[in-house]
Amino acid sequence: MTTTRDQVGTDLRRSLGRRQMTMLGLGSALGTGLFLGSGAAIGIAGPAVIVAYVICAVIAGIISACLAEMTARYPLRGAFGALCARFLSPFAGYVARWSYSAAAVIAVGSEVVAAATYLRFWWPGLPMWVGVAVVAGIVVAINLVGVGSFGAVEFVLSSVKVIALSLFIVFGVLLVFVGLPRLDAVGVENLTGHGGFAPHGWAAVWQSMSIVIFGFVGIELVAISAPEAKDPRGAIEAAMRTLIWRLAFFYIAAVAIVLCVVPWTDAATGGGVRSSPFVQVFGAVGIPAAAAITNFLVLVAAVSAANANLYGATRLINSLALDGMAPRILRATSGRGVPVAAVALAATGTLVAAVLTMSGVANIYVLLTSVAIFGVLVTWLLILVSYLRFRDGAPRTGFAAKLGKPAALVGIAGVLAIVATAAAVHMMTMSLVIGLLFLLILAGVYRAAGLHNRLPAATD
């Protein structure tokens, strides 16, 4: 059903297919964290980081299943934000959407700056601001063309990453268990060498989850895209189910191969492209120009993640405007069904984040990143609590129905356990403190603007 407010100039286009929705989620989740950031997690837990990836995959799978079941029944504009408003309160929906939008905008800024940095691998003299302007311009242009073209571009970008990771895993498995021409099988001895499987103890596995879990951020974008899907009710569950298993496989398999081929003490040194664990594996296989290949992959990963996150932020901001919780100008869509004003707002925030990153104002950017981390965790908790309320009156028709409330409670416990790493991980401590201040600001704006007296319009 289309509500009155959607009659003129606020419609979205139903142009996304099932595979495009799946690739949209992969595009956001398979960012630079896997190719570069995995080294940091390995440095904390050693080979036992594989356990952290398995646990985080289970947590993400529960969130994915619960969100998919709710979204399949209610494919609302505003996705999990609208669901939180429906099953918890308008304030919960407001917090979920603004928190995730802030996280997504900050993520876009960091990915754009990262992409500009990767361009300098081939053109060292390229001014940073030029690289940022070019990448940001491309990402914004893709989001302004129309959701059909956006989905096609994101499908191609995500496919490059999926194909590359698939080849990496195939060659990795052969190298570990069979061997390659002129290379004997390396076996799995590196998993227990250099101090054992858990060289820093099992508490380190828990601490590493504060890094590992964010490799799965992006699964929510499938739900956000539901109102623009050709068949939202039929496609959402299939897309979410496919997405989470692919993510779990790629992360666990790729990291396990890295740890088998490269001693974890070497893989943990990752930071730049040349020291990435993936470069070290490519080098071990004997592939020439390993650093250049990895740089191309992380460049594609950064552009794809920036593209997908900008899409997610604009759709949530647009839905807030439709519910009277953001300026009315953000409601409007172009003739192609694109919320242009919302794209412009999100892009402005992206430029701010990019400028802060380039200026070397590390402390301010750390604060912004802390808001992003906290925003995602708060959103996940609200999704799971909403599912508990949803299950009270929902027929058992979704693929998450067999899991039901017990699984949602496990998911809540898992997210809270990650939040609890604030006791030992400085970044998570910062995230908790700054995130709570951010919530207070959101609550103050909500009250001052009189939004507590408004009811969100029903969105279909």
Image (spheres, grey):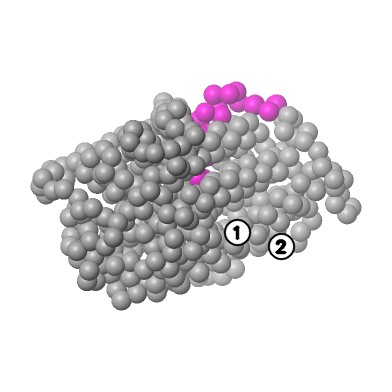
Residue 349, quarter of the rendered image: bottom left
**Image quadrant in which the C terminus is located:** bottom left
Between circles 1 and 2, the one closer to the viewer is 1
Q: Is residue 223 above or below residue 392?
A: below
Q: 432 or 75: which is nearer to us?
A: 75
Instruction: Name the side, left or right, on which 405 lies relative to 47.
Output: left
User: Which residue is under mark 2?
Assistant: 289
Q: Is residue 282 above or below residue 212?
A: below
In space, the residues marked 1 and 2 are separated at their CA atoms by 18 Å
Amino acid type, residue under disc 1 in the picture:
Lys
User: Which residue is under mark 1?
Assistant: 161
Q: Is residue 276 above or below residue 383?
A: below
**Image quadrant in which the N terminus is located:** bottom left
Q: Is residue 204 magenta?
A: yes
Residue name at image x 62 percent, y 35 percent = 50
Most extreme residue toward the bottom is: 335
At mark 1, the secondary structure is: helix
Amino acid type, residue under disc 2 in the picture:
Ala
At mark 2, the secondary structure is: loop
Q: 137 or 71: which is nearer to us?
A: 71
Image location of residue 97, percent across then percent down: 30, 49
Report the span colored magenta: 195-216
Most extreme residue toward the right is: 182
Q: 109 or 412: which is nearer to us?
A: 412
Closer to the chain start, of discs 1 and 2, is 1
Q: 316 or 110: which is nearer to us?
A: 316
Residue name at image x 77 percent, y 36 percent = 188
Residue 6, quarter of the rendered image: bottom left
Residue name at image x 33 percent, y 60 percent = 314
Residue 249 in sight here: yes
Image location of residue 413, percent across then percent down: 43, 27
